[in-house]
Image: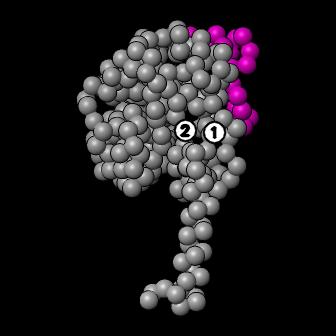
Amino acid sequence: MSVSFTRKLKDQKQKGEKIVMLTAYDYLTARLIDESGVDLILVGDSLGHLFSGYKTTLPVTIDEMIYHTKAVTRGVTKAAVVADMPFMSYHISIESAKQNAGRLMQEAGAHAVKIEINSATYPVAPALIQIGIPVIAHLGLTPQSVYQLGGYREQAKTEKEVEQLTNLAIKLEKDGCFAILLEQVPSEIAKVIAESISIPVIGIGAGPHCDGQVLVTHDVVGLTPDRVPQFVKQYDTLGTRFKSAVQAFSKDVKTGHFPK
């Protein structure tokens, strides 16, 4: 991974080259994704759903994020690794936010952190940037606020909300964030925001006008046990093929065809 990855991503936006980001929570998956040539690997707190089986991301702790980020960074040599700051790891105070973000970089080897930003958490981003921690600001649907938002639904539907979101993205660029992650925002609004700032806007369920796209890897390859969001495109059905392989092995063992 080049130390100039933040500048490279900005150059990609200027050249019109789309940015690719996928999630990973373990060494092997991270290695396979890295070898496939993506730009960014996100150790998302979505591991709460897909690794730990929680109903939301809220139970995920900073220690869990450090554990999984360590595993991911061991498998990565090219992509930049971004670690989510989980619920309550940056909400109590600026000092605790600095400490937890520092642990993700120093102990776990992350190259940057991602923070879900709203009016209350906004001051965290510039505080981390000032001490040398690269930050992606997550705007729009912020899953750590799922109860407050009333569920996983599209955001920025009123004129006031659109104006607030756009102004916040502009402010975060000025503060030094190297990218914005925009989740479940109408396509035309995402386009306006992407054109309003010079740093990359990476979308998830925010349409084709963003400078890049991120999805949960389990959704992309067909490993998610439940129904995936409408904006996801599945490129394989690994879950079905995985079960078929296990069933075939089980049958061979029971019938004496393995081992021979």
Q: Residues within 10 Å of mark 1 (few under 14, many from 20)?
A: some
SS of the residue under disc 2: strand
> Distance from label 1 to label 2 (Cα)?
7 Å
Q: Closest to the observer: 168 or 50?
A: 50
Q: Earlier in the sequence, mark 1 or mark 2?
A: 2
Task: Give how far across and how far down residue 39 sits, in percent.
Answer: 39, 33
Q: Residue at x 58, y 76 (%)?
A: 248
Q: Which residue is mark 1?
A: 232
User: Marks 1 and 2: CB-CB under 8 Å?
Assistant: yes
Q: Amino acid at mark 2?
A: Leu
Quadrant placement of the C terminus: bottom left
Q: Amino acid at mark 1?
A: Val
Task: Give how far across and how far down residue 142 sits, in percent.
Answer: 60, 32
Task: Give how far across and how far down residue 186 sits, in percent.
Answer: 68, 21
87 lies above or below 180: below
Q: Closest to the observer: 31 or 62?
A: 31
Q: How many marks?
A: 2
Q: Residue at x 48, y 40 (%)?
A: 22
Q: Residue at x 35, y 27 (%)?
A: 134
Quadrant placement of the N terminus: top left
Q: Residue at x 60, y 54 (%)?
A: 237
Q: Is 176 included in the stretch rendered in magenta?
A: no
Q: Residues within 10 Å of mark 2 (few under 14, many from 20)?
A: some
Task: Give how far across and how far down residue 207 sits, in percent.
Answer: 62, 24
Residue 156: image tag: none
157 lies above or below 228: above
Q: Quadrant of residue 239?
A: bottom right
Q: Which residue is mark 2?
A: 215
Look at the image and give the residue range highlighted in magenta. 147-168
SS of the residue under disc 1: loop
